[in-house]
Image (tube, rainbow, N blue to C red):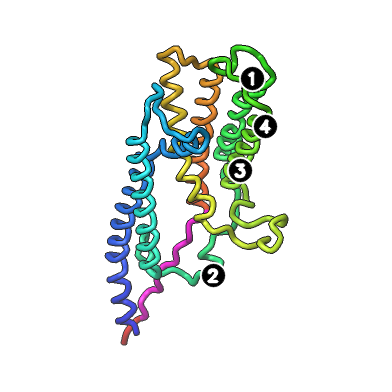
Amino acid sequence: MGAAAAATTIVAPPRGRILLAVSAALWTMAALSLISSCWVLLSIIELALTGTVRDRDGNSDWLAFGERLALAVVGALFLATALSWQRRGAGVCARCGSAHSARSSARWYPTPSAAPPRVRRIAYAGCGVFGPYLFLHALGAAGVAGIEPNGFRPTWQAVAGGVIGIGLAVFLLLGLVQTWGMVFPRWTLWLSGRRVPRFLPLAPVWLIAPTLALYGTGSLVYAFFTEYGVLSLGGAASVAFAGYGWALAIAAVSYQVRTRPSCVRLADPAPTA
């Protein structure tokens, strides 16, 4: 028994390093593919609202849309492969090469906790940046001239739809930094007290955070050098998307760290006679 334990201790760390290297490669490819497809979300929204996809100059942009969609599919495939590889490596931790405790053990699932105060403040700021954007839209719906481009006046129904969408976005961000994002709260009825699967908030987060962060940051930089204007509805939208996207990414990293399974080292080999 002592020899078997010693052999396990010798073999596990190299296997753990191999798991770590392959997992890192798969997750890196998934991340690069999803980041490269970051504009596909905006294209899909435009397609649903207008029935077509156009670039900034108003020209048809179907080729670029197809490329982004293909990159999103490739990223999803790499993501599924990474998760499958991680499951096949169950029993040996890819981080430390040691055996994990059983999934039912309290040490496998960390104790539910809120994010550190600094991360929570970033999340609250990410929620608050939508305020000016919604306020300007409301002014445009009220008929104030010079708010919307080309004299467009949104309907109050459109403003209400934006409020609902932003409310869902705020709910997702706050769930990443609060305890109820790790354990279902009481108002979820039969789910109350159950642990929230990690993929449930993280999957949509990593699909939309790169899009919003890069789009908002890029359009904000663009606004400084063109007539697009920072102090406008477009500038408020850029600040809102960039601020929320980066806050979402930071909160997601914190959530991943706080929900990461803990490691249990293999027992030292028993002394042999």
Q: Quadrant of residue 143?
A: top right
Proximity of marks 1 and 3: CB atoms separated by less than 8 Å: no
- Give whichever of 60, 174 is nearer the camera: 60
Which residue is drawn at the image coordinates 66% and 23% (left, top)? 138
Label 3 is placed on what type of residue? Leu
Marks 2/4: CA distance? 49 Å
* Mark 1: few/some/many CA within 10 Å (<14, 14-19, 20+): many
Residue type (three-letter) at the residue carrying disc 1 = Gly
Mark 2 or mark 3, whichever is nearer to me: 3
Q: Which residue is mark 3?
A: 174
Q: Which mark is residue 6?
A: none
Which label is found at residue 105?
2
Tell which circle, 1 or 2, labels the residue nearer the N-terminal end. Answer: 2
Residues shaded magenta = 259-270
Q: What is the distance, in whole Å, between disc 4 and disc 1 at their CAs?
A: 13 Å
**Circle 2: element type:** loop
Dividing the picture into quadrants, the one containing residue 57 is: top left
- Name the residue beneath numbered marker 1: 140
CB atoms at circles 3 and 4 under 8 Å apart? Answer: no
Residue 34: x and y, percent? 38, 44
Labelled pair 2, 4 in contact (Cβ < 8 Å): no
- The reply to whether the C-beta atoms of the residues labelled 4 and 1 are less than 8 Å apart is no
Q: How far from the left and from the top, in percent, is residue 46?
A: 48, 34
